[in-house]
Amino acid sequence: MTEKTPTLDTASESKYRIIGKRVDRYDAADKVTGQAVYGADVHPSNLLYGKVLRSPHAHARILSIDTSAAEALEGVHAVITGADLPSVSDRIVDLGETATSLRYQSDNILAKDKALYFGHAIAAVSATQPYIAEEAVSLIKVEYEILPPVLDVRKAMRPDSTLLHDDIFTDELGQKSTQASNVASHIRHAQGDVEAGFRQADVIIEHEFETTMVHQGYIEPHNATAIYNPSGQITIWCSTQGSFGVRSQTSDVLDVPISSVHVIPTEIGGGFGGKNSIYLEPLAVLLSKKSNNRPVKLTMTRAESLAATGPTSGSYIRVKLGADANGHLTAAKLYLAYEAGAFPGSPVGSAAGSMISEYRISNVLIDGYDVVVNKPRTEAYRAPGTSNAVFAVETVVDELCEKLGMDPIAFRLLNAAKEGDRRPDGPTHPRIGFIETLQAAQSHDHYQTPLDGKYRGRGVACGYWGNWGGRSSVSASMNADGTISLITGSIDLSGTRTTTAMQLAETLGIDLEDIVPQVADTNSVSNTEGTYGSRTTFATGWAAHKLGCKLIDAVKERAALLWDIPVDTVDYEDGCIFSKANRLTFKDISKYLDETGGPLMVSATSFEGGHGPSATTHIVDVEVDPDTGKVDILRYTAIQDVGKAIHPDFVEGQIQGGVVQGIGWALNEGYFYNDEGQLLNANFLDYRMPTFLDVPMIEAVLVEVSNPRHPYGVRGVGEVPIVPPPAAVANAIHDAIGVRLTALPMSPARVLEAVWEQTPSAYLG
Amino acid sequence: MSQRIHVQTEINGEAQDFLCDPRESLLDVLRNTMGLTGAKEGCRNGNCGACNVIMDGILVNSCLVLAVEAEGSSITTVEGINTPVGLHLIQQKYMDHAALQCGICTLGLIVATKALLDHNPAPTEHDVRLWLAGNLCRCTGYDKIVRAVLDAAEAMRENV
């Protein structure tokens, strides 16, 4: 059977047997009973526990490290420092959604000459008990020369700023500059003539925005358990979004052959982009090597997770938009300065590619800067870099609508990009469903129902995200009873074993119960990129479809042998193999495997383009307490083009979860550093993520504009839901109290200050 | 090496004893000594609820209970929520409503839900949100969990 030719599918419910059904999730029972094994649950025989010593300074030269007292403590087996890591070259390593130099990756894992942020790893210890390891790290004496911390992105960009690195020379639009700088790179996207565009405009709005670092906030902190065995074979168990990424990064940092590293991924307690890079894995390996080959487990505390793993960038953004009197956008000029943290690699590039791409604008100029500061190295976070940029863009769009006296959805419909329009960063839009989400929003009960009440307001904001495809590998073995063991390399964060199996079952025309999916380790399946970029149901699902086609070809060949007829006279449909005279079910062929050649196993991979971008429109109602500045979310509706929802519950869950993360980003979450660069809120009480009490039910409306370039119309769904919430909430706050907030988070203090600024009498009570 | 202390307790209906260091938390002993890894460590300071267990009828964060305090107490962990014939209705409803994604917070939430419904068999949506506000979930946005808990409450009332 040839692969299904992707066609534009109108997403009719009846078309599929399994796709689109709210089936049971394969791994759910283990996850409600406590049987599912997460990284910290792994307990190999003879286990030791590790602990990392971290820098209390944001910027300091390491003059000396004395580990003798720690080594002398009873129960301690090994102590390592940056000197134990091999020196590595400057080549680029892929971290999944981001990339960095191998030297920077190594320096981030253990500081060598300088500590570059509060929490930077300095040394690590293994001991018989976790509390002995904790005591041991407190006995390590580090002599620091404290340097001035660089904490503000704009100050960091000045030529006279203190430098974090003496070897960063700005990549200025592709040309290396000759003077060392904290600006790692300057990118630009230009389309049309932006100044001419502003001359055509009747209304021009320009604002500056500032946002702080925020963290993915997965509930499970990072962990790694490793054995370096006497033959030099390395086994790592860890919670990661991508086991193959852990394998290649660990092999790079430790300078060992990739084949010597075996990664066994466990269940993972959330990632959202933050578990692509390695942090603890090489430390656990080195500690095991120095601890007489005993396995070593490292787990981060919550404080370590917040202070020393990658949040996403804080930023300084300027947005200038122009529109003519009819409401057509004529020009956009955007300036983005993103904190990369201690090493280059902020998501300023992906922000520039997504922040305004859902609009059709002839004249656009986007300048983006990747800037190092003395804060943790940033990592991907759900639609990396885009929520804060869209907060800026969609706030200005809202003000344009206000000035033009236009309905915010009507304005966006007028300017919405569609298939064939060119994005400011170059690519041409394939079929996208932005207009469909706007139309659905316009007619939705939420938008049609008037909002009454003082201090209440409604906001609208939209978002766009490009999504990703990438490499995926799967294999299938037929069991003795005709069921299929499905092996996938994709880490399952939220049900992708099931959505992958659903696409295979659909292709084969068999029952979902006849497929047993499993996530495999790096020795059991081929290269598979991490679960990021909203790629897994798209790309691994595509691989599963190819796998199904190969399985159909294989069982047809077996049947031809069995029936002793030419294979081209054998057909397959709805789970049955048949010829003019014969008929067998897919499962029945299992009875005849030995007489037709033996065991049946096939594999398939995908490495496709065609990942359909996502677009979404959000509506939110808020109520502002004028006495406290607290903002309550009254109602929230998120309308998203989801391509084809393979499992609608899971898609709704992605949207609801992304929206609530976005609400947290909007209202409360943010890193607070003191002037010395020490993180003041490295715990979940003060890094205030939304609780059950902070949000209402989140209505997710699935608009299915099939992705014509996927066999089942799938487009990624996981990331774009986090894009509009900060802007939507800001626009609702403006509607409620008439104030435009231009900084995140829009905490009670910020809201109250804005109210007082606007109405000084309110301050006087 | 400090003096280790002998603690006698009941876990999930069975008499258990263990030796612990005075500074160890109940969470550490459950996970590292007793092998009951259903209680998860998310924050180690009582902010996330992933380590929830029921101790003498009261919902606690086991990371904030010293192991020695468990002397003479009766503890229910998520491993003790199942009924002899299979999943508890609460667990079944979490599955039915797809009220979990990564699952790391789910176990603490199921214990917290059990404690809620033991106290209040007919909670409102607000009651559910208030009671569970000590349990952070970062994946779901809470919507499907609230629905699962309300549905579990109704099903359990009908089952009585």
Image (cartoon, coloured by chain):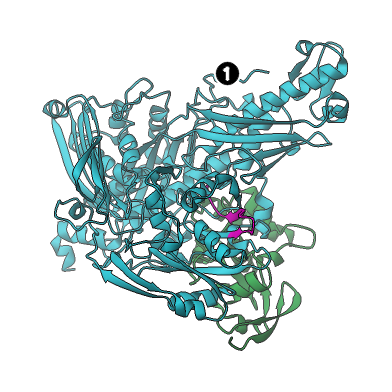
Chain colours: A cyan, B green
| Residue, far left | A199
- Look at 43% across and 23% down and name the residue there: A431
Q: Residue at x 48, y 27 (%)?
A: A609
Q: Position of residue A556 (x, y in %)?
A: 77, 20
Q: Nearer the viewer, residue A294 or A120?
A: A294
Residue A645 appearing in the image: no
Label 1 packing within 10 angstroms: few (<14), some (14-19), many (20+): few
Q: Is residue A193 above or below residue B121?
A: above
Residue closer to the observer: A552 or A167: A167
The residue at the point 59 percent across, 72 percent down is B27
**Residue A236 falls inside the magenta stretch:** yes
Number of marks: 1
Which stretch appears magenta? A226-241
Disc 1: host chain: A
Q: Nearer the viewer, residue A458 or A484?
A: A484
State left or right for residue B66 relative to residue B155.
left
